[in-house]
């Protein structure tokens, strides 16, 4: 596929067929995706390819606490898990919230699940002293994640970036044998989409970019 076509038609895929994804295909995707940039080219990323159903069932369970808060906050009219305000629902209300199947099904039904980790000992977190949630370290791992999804699209596959299990990072580390020095960045179910969606809705460039300043003229 043309590069721009891949960029414009790579959706978040959460429904998969029963078609297998051979190791050869996954290896080809990762072989191309590994050329993603990272801070200082230190390449502190690691990918765990999970196919075992029992492990995936546990990952799905680890999604649930974060999903409960996510759903409860949406019902309360909040942007879920935003770092600027505490949850409006009580801890009891969150604990009583049901977990919709769509939040756990992709991890269970995908042909494979890729867990992306990054070594915190080699990232340059320039925002670590700011009074906000850190973001900069993601620059050393998320380009790889997105390269994998672009490569999957090129192979006729699809997936989505999920992060619910990250809220239970110590348990994910224990499950997958991830060293303490590594952060879990994303859990990506990957497989052949039930439906191929190629028309995506995004804001126009005039709303996305401005000239010279945040409040400048639309670009």
Image (cartoon, rainbow, N blue to C red):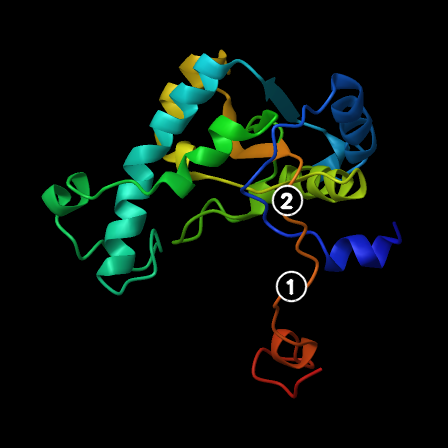
- Residue, x 61% and y 79% (percent of image)? 207
Q: Looking at the image, which is closer to me, 170 or 134? A: 170
- Residue, x 66% and y 55% (percent of image)? 197
How many numbered markers are drawn? 2
Residue 77 lies left or right of residue 133; in this view the side is left
Q: Which residue is mark 2?
A: 139
Please, what secondary structure does the residue beneath circle 2 have? helix
Q: Which residue is mark 1?
A: 200
Where in the figure is residue 110, as x and y percent of width and height?
A: 57, 30
Where in the figure is residue 216, as x and y percent of width and height?
A: 62, 85
Between label 1 and label 2, give the one nearer the viewer.
1
Up the image or down, 7 lies above or below 177; here it is below
Q: Looking at the image, which is closer to me, 72 or 214? A: 72
For the residue carrying disc 1, how many other residues have a C-alpha within 10 Å: few (<14), some (14-19), or many (20+)? few
Please, what secondary structure does the residue beneath circle 1 have? loop
- Residue 38 can be seen in this image: no
- Residue, x 32% and y 59% (percent of image)? 84
As measured in the structure, the alpha-carbon distance from the residue carrying label 1 to the one carrying label 2 is 24 Å
């Amino acid at each position: 596929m043309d590069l721009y076509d891949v960029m414009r038609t790579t959706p978040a895929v959460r429904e998969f067929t029963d078609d297998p994804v051979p190791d050869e295909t996954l290896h080809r995707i990762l072989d191309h995706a590994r050329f993603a940039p990272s801070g200082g080219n230190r390449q502190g990323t690691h990918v765990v390819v999970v196919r075992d159903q029992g492990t995936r069932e546990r990952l799905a369970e680890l999604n649930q606490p974060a999903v409960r808060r996510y759903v409860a906050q949406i019902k309360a009219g909040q942007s879920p898990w935003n770092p600027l305000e505490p949850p409006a629902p009580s801890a009891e209300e969150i604990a009583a919230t049901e977990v919709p199947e769509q939040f756990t099904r992709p991890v269970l039904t995908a042909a494979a699940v890729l867990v992306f980790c990054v070594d915190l000992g080699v990232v340059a977190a320039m925002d670590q002293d700011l009074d906000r949630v850190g973001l900069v370290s993601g620059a050393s791992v998320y380009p790889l994640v997105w390269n994998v999804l672009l490569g999957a699209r090129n192979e006729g596959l699809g997936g989505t970036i999920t992060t619910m299990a990250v809220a239970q990072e110590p348990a994910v580390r224990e499950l997958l044998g991830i060293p303490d020095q590594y952060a879990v960045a994303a859990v990506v179910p990957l497989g052949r989409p039930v439906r191929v969606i190629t028309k995506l809705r995004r804001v126009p460039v005039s709303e996305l970019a401005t000239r010279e300043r945040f409040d400048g003229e639309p670009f």
